[in-house]
Image (cartoon, grey):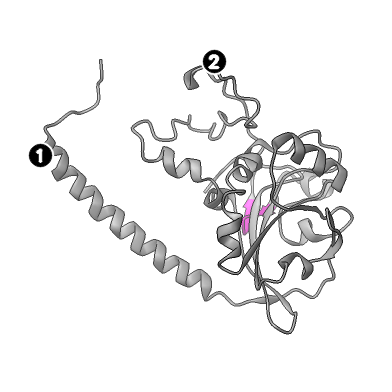
Amino acid sequence: MTTHVTATREKWLEARLDLLAAEKDLMRRSDDVARLRQRLPWVPVDKAYVFDGPDGRQTLADLFDGRHQLLVQHFMLKPGAEVGCKGCSYMADHVDGMTVHLAHRDVTFVAISRAPLNEIERFRRRMGWQFRWVSSYGTDFNYDFGVSFTPEEVAKGRINYNYGTWRHTGEEWPGVSAFYKDDAGDVFHTYSTYGRGVEVMMGTYRMLDLVPKGRDEQVGHNMAWVRHHDRYNPEAPAKTLTAVGSCCKASV
């Protein structure tokens, strides 16, 4: 028997209209924040990063693939790892349907990881993804953009992540970065987001926010239910999934 508040259709509509006002306010504030994001100053990228990809060695400028804007998923797959981060994989599961739409808005998408290309390709084939994914192995790219950390940094017990001191440690953390290339070929870093900011790629969360149980996550164990999409048990209802730690702990 349900213990949730029930009401007549008329009372429901009254409450729904109150919620609609809050939703519209949130949408307007989200639009305002987007405009602030677009007005951020740009930082020239002067370092010559070179990546390994399916099309051979490519510079950061090459990754734009003829467009002016580039979105990068900093995918947590370090050298020697057998599988990619579950949280990053959850993000990546939403990508293939977006790339054609992004391309028609002058945006190229690419995932970048520290693992060598052969290790990336092995995991990409398993997951069935089609988006472009390149290796930054041997470069400073991940470190320079705040998603990879040296053993010495980790040993201190705190790292500088998400624009502040981060109490969780680890060599790899997720992020999303944006870049712009002008007609002269100069590249600029325009934006990066980390922590819960990477939920921008998690469309499933937005759908879960619409249903009565919401995300249904335990406090302190957010994303513990997430699996690589080929590792869910199709016979098990969601409530039987064992809560295990995620390698992408989301935090404000």
- Circle 1 SS class: helix
Q: Position of residue 165 (x, y in %)?
A: 64, 53
Give the number of the disc on residue 10.
1
Give the number of the disc on residue 207.
none
The image shows residue 209, relative to residue 104, as above or below, that is: above
State the residue at coordinates (56%, 67%).
105
Q: Position of residue 2 (x, y in %)?
A: 25, 20
Frontmost residue, 57 versus 1: 57
Please name which of the two marks, 2 or 1, marks the residue nearer to the observer.
2
Asked if residue 118 lies left or right of residue 83, the reply is: right
State the residue at coordinates (69%, 50%).
131
- Circle 2 SS class: loop
Asked if residue 170 lies left or right of residue 99, the reply is: right
- The answer to whether mark 2 and mark 1 are in CB contact below 8 A is no
Residue occupied by mark 2: 235
Assign the magenta stretch its main secondary structure: strand
Frontmost residue, 241 versus 244: 241
Q: Compute the Cα span from label 2 to label 1.
A: 39 Å
Asked if residue 243 lies left or right of residue 36, the reply is: right
| Quadrant of the image occupied by residue 246 | top right
Asked if residue 225 lies left or right of residue 27, the reply is: right
Asked if the stretch drawn in magenta spans residue 121, the answer is no
State the residue at coordinates (86%, 52%).
137
Frontmost residue, 30 versus 168: 30
Give the amino acid at mark 1: Glu
Q: Residues within 10 Å of mark 2 (few under 14, many from 20)?
A: few
Q: Which residues are magenta?
A: 160-165
Give the amino acid at mark 2: Glu
